[in-house]
Image (spheres, grey):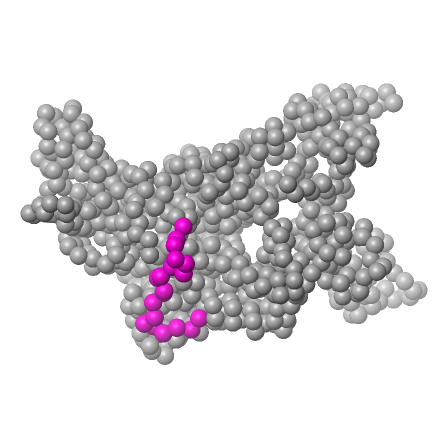
Amino acid sequence: MSLGLAIRAFFAALKGGVTAQRIAAAINNGAGDSPPLASEKAITTSPPVDVNRNQTKQPSTRSDALTLLAALQREARLLDLIMEPIDGFQDAQVGAAAREVLRNSRQVVNRMFAVEPLSDVNEGESLEISPGSSPNAFRISGANSSGKGIVAHRGWKATLCEVPSWHGVPDEAWLLAPVEVDI
Amino acid sequence: MTKQYSIGIDLGTTNCVMSYANLLADRPHIELLRIRQVTALNEHEELEYLPSFLYLPTEQETEAGVFDLPDYPVYPTVNGYFARQASAENPERTIAAAKSWLCHASVDRHAAILPWQAPDEIAKISPVAASRFLLRQLVDSWQRSFPTAPIENQQVVLTVPASFDLAARELTREAALGAGLPADFILLEEPQAAVYHWLETTGENWRQTVKEGDSLMVCDVGGGTTDLTLVQVCSEAGELNLRRIAVGNHLLVGGDNMDLALAHLAAQKFSQLGHKLNAWQSTSLWHACRRAKESLLSSDGPAAETISVLGRSSKLVAGTISIEVDREEVQSLLVDGFFPFCESTELPRRESQSGFQEVGLPFEPDTGITRHVAEFVANNVMSSDSDLYLLLNGGVFKGSVLRERAVQAVRRLRQSESSVRILGKLDDLDFAVSRGATYYGWAKHHGGVRIRGGTARSYYVGIESSGLAVPGMPRPLQAVCVVPLGMEEGSEVSVPGREVGLVVGRAAKFRFFASATRKDDRPGTVLKFWDEDELIETSPMELLLDMDEAQDSSFVPVTFLSKVSELGVLELWCKHNASGRQWKLELNVRDAVEVPQA
């Protein structure tokens, strides 16, 4: 590991805050972001972690991507839908399940990202592109010097980014949905 | 210390909302406060509302810290979003509608009784504590968002149902103070807050919209309760003003009942197809029904909606089952069921539907909201040549079909052809009460029209009449009016009439009654007979005089004195006329009132 990183970590730790806690977690637990060490078999039988109060008190982080995936499964069952082989099912059966999942997924996405169309101009209507506009905002197909075109897709943008904060133990960061057991 | 913000809190039966406006700005710019809450194990989010649900975690869950909010205290209950989700899978550990228990006089509201009928191994909490925990979470959210403007230095307005009686208001106040609200916070009635929201969004134009003599009926149908209030436009010194002239009874019927009714219909259809739903599926059905209701009851809604319940296992598509409900079915079930057309003389059906009634929450046996409105209109004479405006509030009225039906049904109740119109916009039915409360706090500092009206009820002390004692019979009871309906904030009144003797060293206990309909009783009016519907017994009033206060006499003759503070707090005092000394009567909310079951 480079000396520069070590020095940066030192000063970040000195300043305290989230970074400091992350450094502490990384030192205490080996590697905060590595995949779980427990074997897959262990997950199916018992929780793979030794739940330890001291450990849980330190807020640790996991990738927002995992938290988002877990939320989409929990509130919309999105993982169940996309992981299930659907070859043998009638379209109507797939549609009935998909309709529910899609509605709930949209709720989650809207709550966390408040997604809106990027362009105010409707699809099929004409739009003037100012010279020097960002290629990330406008993807232009065809060659025409007028700067005028027809909107084929309005684009999307997030107006919010509020993925839930997660504060579990590092080894559990990779769990997306619990085993459900009825007793 | 100058207050910096006006904060409006809607402590709802199903959702809590908190909003605020800067008092130093010259326009009320009202914002919603996002509330940090647990949304799943180890996860938290900031949302625009806090569902009014509490989940009692297991020891293992507490031990593992999966519900801890970083930088927040550890709460004994998990409040909000997660608790609402858990209410389906774990009903015995979840508390819903804690607020409705606050006004339930048949139980001791300080006793640890919630979740109602939970098994013994679960450590229960009291209705007052449940409300306190919810408010505490709101307060803590504020403190973290505005560390330089602590809530104890702000203008806080907390809303309560207009139909809350004195005891329920006192208990709400107790919960609020316990949660850290400042001592000078104001209790505002929810329907009034809805009117303030309308005033705020209309601005000074409201004086062009309504005229003298017009009436405004606020019909607030929340998730679990319905609250009615009548406000009259009057003219004082050439200025149009608003006066609240009546409030309805506390009705435990609301939007949740509608979702449940539709879920029952759907569950029947599933069982006809041979599917029996388990608890998990029932919740998911409930959510699906709520959505189908909103879609089918909007004016441009589809003719039919598919309601699907997903398979529970990870084989989602294979396990999904669906049924269809059409617009007409839903229309007759919900529109005719909850907003039936009725005649102005029709009364709500009082008889309970099943043979025995649980001691749980006294849910309204008659879900026909319009019949309750009819009774309310019949009890409150409105001038027939002026206009009646309807201010519809609550999430139920998002569906335009229900809004239309409510107006038509109220039109039918009015003998004359005078107009009944809807006031206000649809924009934020879910947030109107909180925003209106914030506006009220703001207007209190900046000036602006205020709804006058004073106390929503008249109050009576029960006194045994002296007469010949008949063995085995209690002495006949008389009710003496001590607070007239509409007694204004900041006023006090000495109750004329004969003196009552307090025995020193023994707690004097007075039965206490309230009425929302007896408008003409003055302080000192004595009632010998009354209808059970007319005078509702609430928690008794108590006073204990000890020896040194009584100055050597064993018997102190007193008269009653009532006061309503500037903050709307009602107090009842006993006054010894010879010495001028006064003692405050305290509400006794520990002893449950025997409420006759219908």
Instruction: Give the vertical position of A31 relative to B143 (above or below).
Output: above
Q: Residue at x 44, y 71 (%)?
A: B340
Which residue sits furthest right? Answer: A143
Q: Is residue A96 above or below residue B575?
A: below
Viewer-closest of A82 and B523 = A82
Q: Residue at x 46, y 40 (%)?
A: B114
Of residue B304 and residue B139, the one placed in the foreground of this image is B304
x and y, in percent, of residue B343 in the image: 36, 74
Res B377 seen here: no
**Residue B405 location (% of width, % of height):** 47, 71
Vertically, is B6 above or below B291?
A: above
As rendered, which of B184 and B168 lies closer to the eye? B168
Residue B49 is a magenta residue: no
Q: From the image, which quarter does the C terminus of chain A lie in?
A: top right
Outermost residue toward the left in this view: B468
- Taken as a whole, is the magenta stretch helix, strand or loop? loop
Does B349 lie within the magenta span? Answer: yes
Q: Identify the residue at image location x=78%, y=28%.
A: A32
Q: Decide if residue B359 is in sight here.
A: yes
Placement of the N terminus of chain A among the 4 image quadrants: top right
Q: Position of residue A138 (x, y in %)?
A: 83, 57
Residue B267 percent location from the top left of the image: 59, 61
Q: Which residues are magenta?
A: B340-358
* Residue B287 image-quadrant placement: bottom right
